[in-house]
Amino acid sequence: MSDHLTSQQISELVAGAPGAAAEEHVRDCPACRSEVEHFNGTLASFRQSVRHWSEEREPEFAPLRLVSSDRRLAVQSWGWAVAVAACLIAGVELPRVINNRPAAPHQVAAQVTDAQLLARVDRELSEAVPPSLEPIALKNRTQQ
Amino acid sequence: MTVATSEPNTLTADFESVVITYRPAVFRFALAWLRDRDAADTVAQDCFLRAFNSRVAFRGDCGVKTWLMRIAVNLIRDRIRNRKLQFWRRATLEPVDQLSQWLDRGQQSPEATLLCREQVATLWAAVDRLPEKQRCVFLLRFVEDMDVLEIVTATGMKEGTVKTHLFRSLGAVRKRMDPSI
């Protein structure tokens, strides 16, 4: 069995709640005293690093804003609601606007060609003379 | 004006002094626990808002700092719970391995400074792995210099529980720093 302090006893000493025996031992044992002092030193350095870090990171003091983060969250939620509504409106309105736009020139040309074709078909279909009487009709037209 | 501890009238009379005096401690504690500057700022802000709203109920049974720390501990626990639920949100945490750079070792040799920084970095890594309650108790004891009874009030735990968490956290940290233990 070791004569030195246990890990639990060292923790108690560092935490500031040592037993009487541990306190007495650390006074007499250089190895345990060194161990405790080293650990206390590291903890002091840790505390110092946190304080410097915090001082560097702390925002400028401003008068207390009496708005809780819950309230800020509510405002944020409203922002999201407005953004979603804007997207919905854009989704509905945009196709309508696109459909109402004037047709492009190549679309116009295609429409004209289609119209001419349909007119020719209409004309051919609406011929008054059946194909069998076509020679007589032609003769009449030349006499006139 | 200095803020006397355990003085309820001071809270109602001059709350701004309370904020100026204790805001650095609340922010520091929240920053050390959360490692997120914005979150720590929000916690500090909400802590003083809650304190302001319930300042009349403060009877002076404990110190003002202990009372504020109790509010901060509850806010941080809520925040951690929400952070777990909001798994898709990424917090901007300060990397643990860079926290030892804040150590000011102007009086020491470069070798000693380097060694000290390594030890503090290892300690930070160990603290980062501590369970929530142990980390809370550890930070209150070794960053805010609060004694066990103050930690009991700030956390709402029993004295024996606080001591157990304190000893376990120290044991875990020492083991991390010296694996041969």
Image (cartoon, coloured by chain):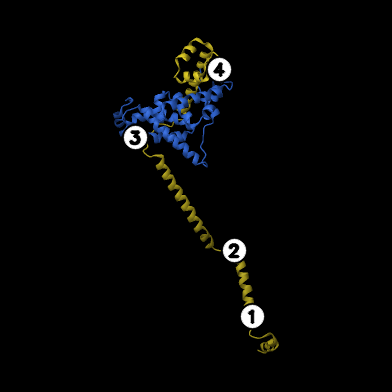
Secondary element under disc 4, as helix, strand or loop, is: helix
CA distance separating discs 1 and 3: 92 Å
Say what secondary structure mark 3 lies in: helix
The image position of residue A40, as x and y in percent, is: 49, 18
Q: Is residue A88 above or below residue B58?
A: below
Residue appearing at x 47%, y 14% in the figure: A21
Per the image, the residue denoted by label 2 is A105
Which disc, if any, is residue A125?
1
Q: Residues under labels 4 and 1: Cα distance?
A: 105 Å
Query: For the residues carrying marks 1 and 3, which lies nearer the camera in this image?
Result: 3
Amino acid type indicated by mark 2 = Pro
Label drawn at residue B112: 4
Q: Residue at x 44, y 45 (%)?
A: A76
Spatial distance from mark 1 to mark 2, Cα to Cα?
Answer: 30 Å
Does residue A106 appear left or right of residue B61 in this picture? right
Label 4 neighbour load within 10 Å: few <14, some 14-19, many 20+: few
* Quarter of the image with the C terminus of chain A in it: bottom right
- Which numbered disc flags the more N-terminal residue, 4 or 3? 3
Q: Quadrant of residue A134?
A: bottom right
Say which residue appears at 62% left-offset and 76% top-offset.
Answer: A119
Quadrant of the rendered image containing residue A75: top left
Mark 2 — on which chain does it sit?
A: A
The answer for how far apart the CA atoms under marks 3 and 2 are is 70 Å
Bin the neighbour count of mark 1 within 10 Å (Cα to Cα): few under 14, some 14-19, many 20 and up. few
Disc 4 versus disc 3: nearer the observer: 3
Rendered view: A118 above or below B58: below
Instruction: From this view, report whether residue A119 is shown above or below residue A99.
Output: below
| Image side of residue B80 versus residue A117, left or right | left
- In the rendered image, which residue does mark 3 sit on? B52
Q: Give the number of the mark in front: 4 or 2.
A: 4
